[in-house]
Image (cartoon, coloured by chain):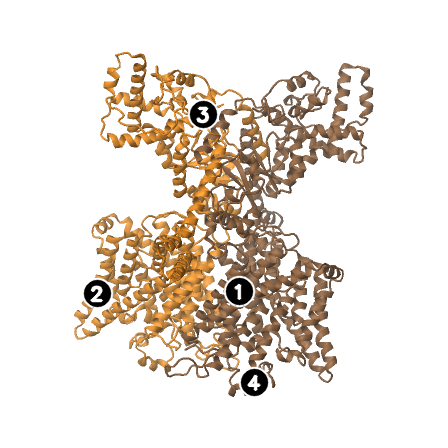
Chain colours: A orange, B brown
């Protein structure tokens, strides 16, 4: 609910316009102003609508006017249409499809090059090994180096970052052109190396980058692309496109991206995702057809399982076993991945060494992995010569490997040949493949290159499924069904189930099932897949966070953990149990010193603004930066010089009125002169007052508000007026308006003086400066130039943790104030919420309060269990006590304000 | 954020306990209280945890103690597990699968009975016709009658109502056992009649009913089932189950239910929906296998299209045409459906007649439809003898009807026979079928029976697709592809595309595509289907609301329209343009008369509570009912008698003190005596004050706050104290606390007096009563017994319409206050938002203000274009003016409060 940049600009514009008109009633003025602005807007609109055609009519009196007008109309129509969502989505889909296709093409080329090298050198094993190993090492090193130099943000999956961005957190540099280039080039090289890396996560990032860049590009045409909430919606659609065009799986892409990046999903975004992802997948597959890779549009990994009897009911337990085992496996994968990262971080000697030689770690890992998968070496036991794609195709194959009879078919298919070994049978090879690929993938995904973990996990899952399937086929060679017709078991179906289950377990998603349907082009195994995926999710979610959440935690990105499966205790915890009661706040009467204290104590992002320390009525919140600006402005050197100059000038003026010759000292002391001065106000309206030389410091400390009115007299008729103003208790309004006015004039002048003499030396001694600053700090804060969020989010102390979590994740909040009938009694930030959800103590229902809370309890809020009637008492209390004089707390001139 | 019932009870408990301890410092007291309660809770918990086993150990010293303990452990474990979500979801899935299966079975029986009757009477066409027509008329009439008698809420689809309920609106009687029975029985009969009605919508409702009833049932076991937000989550899962077990389509079910019922979807609910829907679909299909209907688990309408070349790229334009035509068709269907309903409503004579004879309309419609579909009659041109299911199976058939050669195959298949007619060819029959079914379905879905529109529309769509497919097949008999291999066109694929597109257009969903995949068991046509569905949606959404939104509007349910496709103007409208500035509010100083005025003027649901009319600082909101209760309590007969009695007693007491004999008049006038009196307070703590006999009415009117303190003297040492209290300006606190105290004591006594003499006659004349009530109305409102929502939702005036819509639909808000730095400046309710989204004026960017707004503009808030600095001026203004005497507005004794 913060006022965004555009509005701020408008606000500044307002302020400069408002200048000099403060004596008018502001309500009336504001309405005039509003009418004017509206009129302006309308005129601007009508001008922009009509001007091209009008101009044309004026300048071209030729024959083809009609034709031209028509063209202009068309152009205008097109321009207005450019703003529409679907144009954007089509463009996005098109671009992403092209990117995906080109990347796939390049990756295939790179992989082919390796095979070609490896095949060409088959005379010498050592040379073969060198070629086999050097190639990926070079590629990965290049990828890591390129990424590191161009945009380090491009490393890794990108889904965790997108999740954070879609939650509303601004991550710098994550959506720039540099990152796009680094991600695309780095990913192509990384995947071309043949390491077990995936492209799904990076594709989500690439699509988001595309969308962000397109938004920027399109903002040349229409204004709506500058709207933040719209951009977020477009990013959500882009995530769907990313997955969609990576697997040619539009539906699965939409669902997967929703599950992975969102906590709450706006259904109105749904069609955007579907539209863009479908278009993208369509183009992606059409490109394949045009490239003569395919005869028509079909699935990426098309399977040919039988339709009439896809599986027997009695096979379901085996599918359930795959699901449960995948759940454990998925959790283990996430754990292993995190363990490796943490190990590398903790070992300081390794860490230091690696920090120096950034490319060494990727190179070493690549060397290790490619050595182990060298086909003539250990690779022969794990089908090392197959690429990821070929492996997957062979797993989804319709034939049963375990059967001796069909074993001869292997010779006809080079892919399947890899799984045949003279010494070891299929089961051993599959087990070795699974174990080796498991740790290899977990290790490879920690590399600082753009890479995802989805595809490697998918392949491992397929291998595991195939293993179970082959075992079942060996166990029941005639099929399970005993009703007469023999339906042999299809191990390929098990592979599909395993792939969906393991990838679902690692990513904590159910939509991998849909992705699998779209990848294979068959939905006949829907029930086994759904059962396995759900079981895998149930197991994995209760053991470990998803791989993306794990990375979020490792990278310490701001996040909010999900409420887990059936943790119904969360319904019983309330905000009052987790909130911080010791809220830092400033009041309308706060001095700059209070501001300083607050800014030095904590590193809060925002500070609450309350009416007064007694009432605690929440008025709004102010960002830290705003307060800092206020403070800096108050004690800045420029302002000090300004004040000094003003003081000197006052002296001089008074002397010139009194025509006394003793003014030389002060004018010498302040040896600057105002070379020119801009003053747009009508002098009759401005009650300007010079300040008398301040007599004593303690006295000054108590006249902080009036001190604001330091002013250069533009007309010589006062000096007594200022004193009167200082002494008599005028209503605050005018004072404030004037000081606002002064503020503006000052800021104007500051600019001038900076322009004027940027290197004017300071004419005060250090002691004087300190004293002056102390004085300044004791002044009451003038909030006029400050941006206040006038409606920060508020909760009641009885709001349940569950509801709080919902609201935080729904609205992407960072913190919320806890109020009770207008009074601020606490604050809950993401941190407290995270602790409450993750922490063992609070989750068990025991009410834990922050240690500091008890100190404030008796003072402002002992409200944890009070009834609301008590709250109202307080209100009444405050209400009546407002009329009483309160001297003990406010050491300012409070008799004005109260 | 309202305090719910449980909390309210706790609050009342608090209040009664607090009684008599008001002199203690409340903060301290509250903390003690909190500690006590926490301790209580802990004890209670530990008792409930340990007691069963302890008891057992005490009472049973037999041999099998261990066994028993084990059993108790198991039982406790089970009990704790019962609270888990997945138990609930499994139960829900199981119940719904059984319901679905049994209903399908019954419907099939009913349909078979009709066929059997029709077939048995083939000797006589008249008898045949009578049987054909009477049967559905009876069934529909019964269904309509049964629904009307048992639960009229069961009529119709149920999805609109579920959408409203999931938005947080409580619709009474929509989730009761009665409705469940009515819906199940009514739906079975309605579908058994053979009319073009669907079961998807009602199944969503039935599943929700199931979930609600299960929640109630399960709440015997665990407490969490009473949690409202949990119940909403379970209802969302139930909707998925409803669709899932209706079509055996778990994924499509989840997605469809999300699209149809939610505006924002919590991804954490995702697994719930998938889990329950998968389990339900699984059981539903397993039941079919066990019933020997199927050999194994397969799709409901299994298709056998070829996998290797499902469609040619050049067929895509035809699919796109199907999509666009379906879009127009879908919009037409919604329009036609609404037109029929509105026509029936507008025609008052028809309407009156139908209101009297409720069963006549359904009977007449049924008669018309079944007459037209009588197979030997007009039905022969539209395959009248086929049920919905048979029709669909024939549409999805693999063979091409248009080809002459295959036409002979028709004779082997009774279903396909229906489409063969000696005089008319397939195209004509299909066109007739589409046209007739179109209006029939639109008409039939307006019947007051439980029925949905999805399936009829699905069938029509399939027919349209088949028509296009057959045309294509006739046009390109050799297939389109010219590359050598002949791939003939598959019209069945077109039928699938058409079905998905038309049902998607009518319901405005994309997930019909997924439903179609799951229904047919084939995903090979994914791209054509996605393209057609998206195009259909694009066309339909720009023309008409979805059928469910249309029904919501017809039924005038509270709703919020969606922001449409690319209406980017919405980003530029702000809350200040649409908000109502003339907010009804009450202040802390409001009198009961103000309350009465507010309650009589508008029919607001909640009233804003502000600090004072000048400050306008929003403190909270109060529900209308609460205010009414306050008002009623103030002027109630019981309280009047109470006051009278007290006054009399005061008189008597005083007389007994003064022992003057002149008290007879007054004691005669108040001839009741207090028979017994409960007083738990320690008299030393209670500063009780009797009131002096009121001298004059005008004077009384000005002492409203003090008038609260009418009190029976329990100790005889004051009578002057009361006067002193009346005259001197004491701080408000004590007064309020005491009056709160009085309130409580009064309410206690009220109960006693009601128990005592419930029919005590009124002793005041009408005039006296009126005068007394007038007096009472001028008193200041005591908000202590009133439930205040202490943090109503607040917006800033610069919030965009887009964001407002998001927040309203996210949080299910009904209204939100617009505040500016704590000050209330307007209110936005659903109505304004709806108007702004739908209305033509505001949408175009022209700022329309409610007519009343201008009156308040100059007074409190002319803030439409002011900068925030101005806001702060106001604050300061108010801040300083609080010290000034303000007599013009508050005619109460305000010098106390200000």
Using the rendered image, report if marks 4 and 1 lie on a common chain: yes
Tell me if residue A448 can be seen: yes
Q: Which chain carries label 3?
A: A
**Nearer to us: label 2 or label 3:** 3
Q: How far apart are marks 4 and 2 (CA)?
A: 63 Å
The residue singled out by tag 4 in the image is B410
The residue singled out by tag 1 in the image is B505
Q: In this view, does B222 lie to the left or right of A53?
A: right
Q: Which chain carries label 2?
A: A
Do callouts 4 and 2 mark residues in contact (Cβ within 8 Å)?
Answer: no
The residue singled out by tag 3 in the image is A734
Label 3 Cα neighbours within 10 Å, binned few <14 / some 14-19 / many ≥20: some
Q: Position of residue B866 (x, y in %)?
A: 46, 36
Q: How far apart are marks 3 and 4 (CA)?
A: 94 Å
Q: Where is residue A792 in the image (x, y as percent from the top left)?
A: 46, 39
Q: Is residue A102 left or right of residue B244?
A: left
Q: Mark 1 lies on which chain?
A: B
Q: Which of A59 and B410 is in front in this view?
A: A59
Q: Is residue B441 above or below residue A626?
A: below
The residue singled out by tag 2 in the image is A135
**Nearer to us: label 3 or label 4:** 3
Q: Where is residue B33 in the image (x, y as percent from the top left)?
A: 56, 33
Q: Earlier in the sequence, mark 2 or mark 3?
A: 2
Tell me if residue A867 can be seen: no
Q: How many labels does the image show?
A: 4
């Amino acid at each position: 609910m913060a006022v965004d940049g555009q509005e701020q600009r408008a606000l500044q514009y307002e302020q400069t316009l408002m200048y000099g008109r403060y004596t008018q009633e502001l309500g009336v003025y504001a309405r005039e102003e509003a009418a004017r602005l509206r009129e302006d807007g309308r005129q601007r609109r009508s001008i922009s609508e009509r001007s091209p055609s009008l101009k044309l009519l004026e300048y071209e009196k030729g024959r083809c006017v009609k034709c031209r007008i028509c063209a202009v109309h068309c152009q205008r129509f097109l321009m207005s249409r450019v703003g529409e969502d679907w144009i954007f989505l089509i463009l996005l889909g098109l671009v992403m499809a092209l990117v995906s296709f080109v990347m796939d093409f390049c990756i295939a080329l790179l992989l082919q090059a390796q095979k070609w090298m490896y095949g060409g050198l088959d005379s010498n094993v050592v040379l073969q090994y060198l070629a086999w190993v050097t190639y990926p090492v070079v590629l990965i090193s290049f990828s890591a180096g390129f990424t590191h130099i161009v945009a380090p943000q491009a490393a890794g999956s990108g889904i965790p970052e997108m999740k954070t961005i879609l939650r509303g957190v601004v991550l710098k540099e994550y959506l720039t052109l540099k990152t796009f280039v680094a991600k695309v080039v780095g990913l192509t090289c990384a995947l071309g190396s043949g390491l077990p890396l995936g492209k799904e996560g990076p594709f989500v990032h690439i699509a988001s980058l595309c969308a962000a860049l397109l938004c920027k590009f399109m903002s040349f045409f229409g204004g709506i692309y500058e709207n933040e909430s719209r951009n977020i919606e477009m990013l959500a659609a882009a995530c769907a496109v990313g997955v969609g065009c990576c697997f040619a799986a539009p539906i699965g892409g939409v669902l997967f991206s929703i599950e992975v990046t969102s906590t709450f999903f706006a259904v109105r975004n749904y069609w955007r995702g579907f539209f863009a992802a479908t278009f993208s997948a369509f183009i992606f597959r059409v490109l394949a057809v045009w490239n003569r890779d395919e005869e028509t549009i079909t699935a990426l990994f098309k399977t040919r399982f039988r339709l009439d009897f896809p599986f027997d009911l009695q096979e379901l337990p085996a599918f359930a076993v795959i699901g449960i085992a995948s759940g454990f496996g998925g959790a283990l994968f996430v754990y292993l991945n995190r363990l490796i990262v943490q190990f590398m971080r903790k070992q300081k000697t390794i860490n230091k060494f690696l920090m120096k030689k950034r490319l060494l770690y990727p190179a070493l890992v690549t060397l290790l992995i490619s050595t182990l998968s060298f086909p003539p070496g250990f690779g022969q036991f794990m089908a090392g010569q197959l690429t990821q794609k070929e492996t997957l195709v062979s797993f989804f194959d319709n034939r049963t490997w375990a059967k001796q009879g069909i074993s001869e078919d292997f010779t006809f298919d080079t892919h399947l040949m890899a799984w045949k070994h003279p010494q070891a049978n299929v089961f051993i090879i599959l087990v070795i493949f699974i174990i080796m690929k498991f740790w290899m993938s977990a290790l490879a995904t920690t590399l600082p290159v753009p890479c995802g973990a989805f595809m490697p996990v998918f392949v491992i899952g397929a291998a595991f499924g195939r293993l179970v399937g082959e075992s079942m086929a060996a166990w029941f060679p005639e099929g399970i069904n005993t009703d007469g017709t023999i339906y042999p078991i299809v191990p390929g179906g098990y592979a599909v189930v395993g792939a969906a289950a393991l990838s679902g377990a690692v990513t904590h998603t159910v939509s991998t099932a849909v992705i699998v349907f779209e990848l294979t082009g068959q939905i006949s195994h829907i029930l086994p897949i759904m059962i396995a995926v759900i079981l895998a999710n149930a197991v994995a979610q209760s053991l470990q966070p998803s791989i993306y959440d794990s990375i979020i935690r490792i990278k310490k990105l701001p996040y909010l953990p999900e409420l887990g499966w059936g943790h119904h205790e969360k319904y019983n915890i309330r905000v009052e149990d987790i909130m911080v009661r010791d809220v830092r706040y400033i009041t309308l009467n706060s001095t700059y010193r209070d501001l300083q204290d607050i800014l030095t104590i904590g590193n809060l992002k925002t500070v609450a603004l309350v009416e007064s320390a007694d009432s605690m009525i929440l008025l709004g919140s102010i960002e830290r930066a705003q307060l800092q600006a206020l403070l800096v402005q108050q004690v800045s050197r420029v302002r000090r010089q300004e004040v000094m100059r003003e003081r000197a000038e006052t002296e001089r003026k008074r002397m010139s009125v009194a025509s006394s010759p003793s003014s030389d000292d002060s004018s010498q002391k302040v040896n600057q002169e105002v070379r020119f001065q801009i003053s747009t106000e009508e002098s009759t309206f401005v009650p300007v007052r010079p300040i008398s030389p301040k007599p004593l410091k303690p006295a000054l400390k108590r006249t902080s508000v009036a001190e604001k009115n330091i002013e250069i007299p533009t007309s010589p008729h006062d000096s007594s007026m200022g004193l009167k103003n200082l002494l008599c208790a005028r209503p605050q309004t005018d004072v404030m308006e004037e000081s606002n006015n002064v503020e503006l004039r000052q800021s104007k002048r500051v600019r001038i003086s900076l322009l004027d003499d940027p290197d004017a030396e300071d004419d005060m001694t250090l002691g004087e400066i300190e004293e002056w600053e102390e004085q300044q700090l004791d002044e009451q804060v003038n909030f006029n130039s400050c941006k206040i969020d006038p409606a920060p989010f508020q909760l009641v102390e009885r709001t349940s943790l569950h509801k709080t979590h919902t609201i935080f994740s729904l609205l992407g909040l960072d913190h919320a104030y806890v109020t009770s009938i207008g009074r601020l009694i606490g604050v809950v930030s993401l941190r407290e919420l995270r602790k409450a959800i993750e922490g063992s103590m609070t989750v068990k229902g025991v009410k834990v309060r922050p240690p500091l809370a008890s100190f404030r309890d008796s003072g402002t809020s002992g409200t944890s269990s009070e009834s609301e009637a008590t709250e109202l008492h307080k209100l009444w209390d405050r209400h009546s006590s407002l009329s009483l004089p309160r001297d003990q707390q406010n050491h300012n001139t409070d008799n004005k304000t109260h």
